[in-house]
Amino acid sequence: MVKKSYPEVKEEYKKAVQRCKRKLRGLIAEKHCAPIVLRLAWHSAGTFDKKTKTGGPFGTIRLPQELADDANKGLDIAIKLLEPIKDLFPILSYADFYQLAGVVAVEITGGPEIPFHPGRLDKVEPPPEGRLPQATKGVDHLREVFGRMGLNDKDIVALSGGHSLGRCHKERSGFEGPWTRNPLIFDNSYFKEIISGEKEGLLQLPTDKALLQDPLFRSLVEKYAADEDAFFEDYTKAHLKLSELGYTTHETILIVHNNVAIFDSSS
């Protein structure tokens, strides 16, 4: 297995990341907005195409063209909530900022601590519309969409467990309700709920039911329902992969963002 190489980020940038992380913890705890912040990070990254090397977690989700995608309805709320924090740290790229916020959203709600490697650069060209998963589709659609990103079956099921956080809103997705009894706690309850059958007041989307229809998916659902540690371990790996799609060391000597050097790859 080849170890991934990351850019060497300048000390000033590293310190800004840590200060920003503290501010994000406070905001997300105060506003109870972890679910929508995590969704923002996911949707920002989930547009990546491994063949064309387009899309991915590079800050374009804040652009009107990408935000207008039907799958991103309501994410303008998250962007507006986060913007006052971003204003405090102009040195940070939006690409890093949104992925850092997703990491904090998981951590502050009881989930695993996900490694974060700064150095993503903002792009200016949004990806084509329609690359994100559709809740009304089934097994083949999930494998097609996540496969395009470069993710596998284990990643699909582990990331689905992030729906322990949050709920659907009729005006945004056409569906209504939470997946779990406590949608502000990150744990393995999503898997316990879907495997024990439909219940009044809780949501199961067609994509959730698809995880039970495929034998490979179902075996992972059963594993995670029984073992939260195993889920956290695999979720951490899957989230990290998602957040770093298309993110590689650049060949240039010095990258400058907002007139401040981010990293130097010459050493």
Image (cartoon, rainbow, N blue to C red):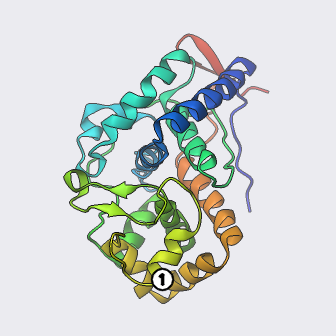
Q: For the N terminus, give its image quadrant.
A: bottom right
Q: Position of residue 75 (x, y in %)?
A: 33, 41
List the residue tagged with mark 1: 195
The answer to whether residue 69 is above or below residue 154 is above
Quadrant of the rendered structure where residue 250 is?
top right
Q: Position of residue 152 (x, y in %)?
A: 53, 70
Q: Residues within 10 Å of mark 1 (few under 14, many from 20)?
A: some
Q: Nearer the viewer, residue 129 or 190?
A: 190
Could you tell me which residue is drawn at 56 percent across and 23 percent down? 92
Q: For the C terminus, give its image quadrant.
A: top right
Left or right of 221: which side holds 144? left
Q: Residue furthest right?
A: 267
Left or right of 255: which side holds 161? left
Residue 124 can be seen in this image: no
Q: Amino acid at mark 1?
A: Ile
Q: Nearer the viewer, residue 186 or 60?
A: 186
Could you tell me which residue is drawn at 64 percent across and 38 percent down? 249
